[in-house]
Image (cartoon, grey):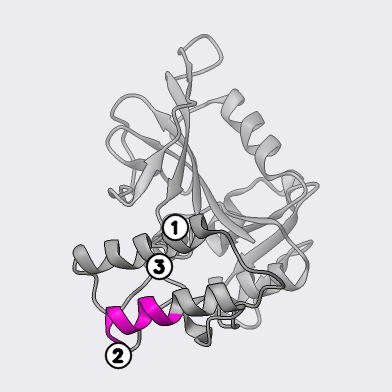
Amino acid sequence: MIVSMVVAFSDNGVIGKDNGLPWSLPKDMEEFRRITSGHHVVMGRRTWESIPERFRPLRGRTNVVLSRDPNYRAEGAMVLTSLDEAIKKAKLDGESELFVIGGAQVYEEALESDVVDRAYVTRVHGDVEGDAYMTALDNRWTRSPLATWHEADANHSHAFTFERYERHRARKPTAHLDGWSLTHATSTCLRGVVSGHTGRPDLTDGTAVRTSSVLSIDLVNMVAETLNTQYMLGTPARAVET
């Protein structure tokens, strides 16, 4: 399941004022509905209470409100005590993409706990007065080249841009050499490939490689080259990352 956040913030990092939005951007609201419809939306108590009653709960979505008060009730919404609990519940429900939609404290918790994979950002151009701020995305995030600019007009108080960011995740190695010398690992691996199995489960994804026929010499050369390249680069106790 993807964990995403949807947020609008100004050039000076403002996301809200007096528990509301300090701008009027109808197209942003339309985009918010389009992105989140059919999914779980997770918000703090103050964000829930800032939504006009006639719009609560947000239609066509599973509304989840976070509150430390076990007696808090939000009609039409599920009340949970933590973001972690909300994520677990969404997974149990078979959700494909969960959306964190505010406010500032919930955004901060989501970013600090490093659970967010994607961010849908409406960047509001200009400095805006406010009392709630967004933590800037750091260099672990990459912006999609697909961004849409909108000018300010009679219906939109500010110019703004729709942006999307993806969080970098370190690739986990699926193999390691454990204490074997490179020469022994290479020769054993090559013998195993040719004969039908490596004899070393941890050189693959946890199960010994077994083949029904002798593999091509090209594959043998590829294995040797990969292992030797790792050695030349000085990669300690690791073989191949996938």
Which residue corresponds to the image point at 48% horizontal and 58% vertical from the top-left?
Answer: 116
Which residue corresponds to the image point at 63% horizontal and 31% vertical from the top-left?
Answer: 31
Q: Main secondary structure of the magenta part?
A: helix
Q: Does 67 sit above or below residue 110?
A: below
Residue 188 x/y as whole percent: 43, 82
CA distance for labels 2 and 3:
15 Å
Q: Give, as a three-letter code, the residue at label 2.
A: Gly
* Left or right: where 11 falls relative to 74: left
Q: Of the residues under marks 2 and 3, which one precedes in the sequence?
A: 2
Range drawn in magenta:
179-188
Q: Quick one: label 1, few (<14), some, or many (20+) residues within 10 Å?
A: many
**Is 41 in the magenta?**
no
From the image, tell me which residue sits under label 3.
240
Which residue corresponds to the image point at 75% horizontal and 73% vertical from the top-left?
Answer: 92
Q: Give, as a three-letter code, the residue at label 1.
A: Tyr
In which quarter of the view is residue 237 placed?
Answer: bottom left
From the image, tell me which residue sits under label 1.
107
From the image, tell me which residue sits under label 2.
179
Q: Quick one: label 3, few (<14), some, or many (20+) residues within 10 Å?
A: some
Q: Of the residues under marks 3 and 1, which one precedes in the sequence?
A: 1
* Left or right: where 176 falls relative to 34: left
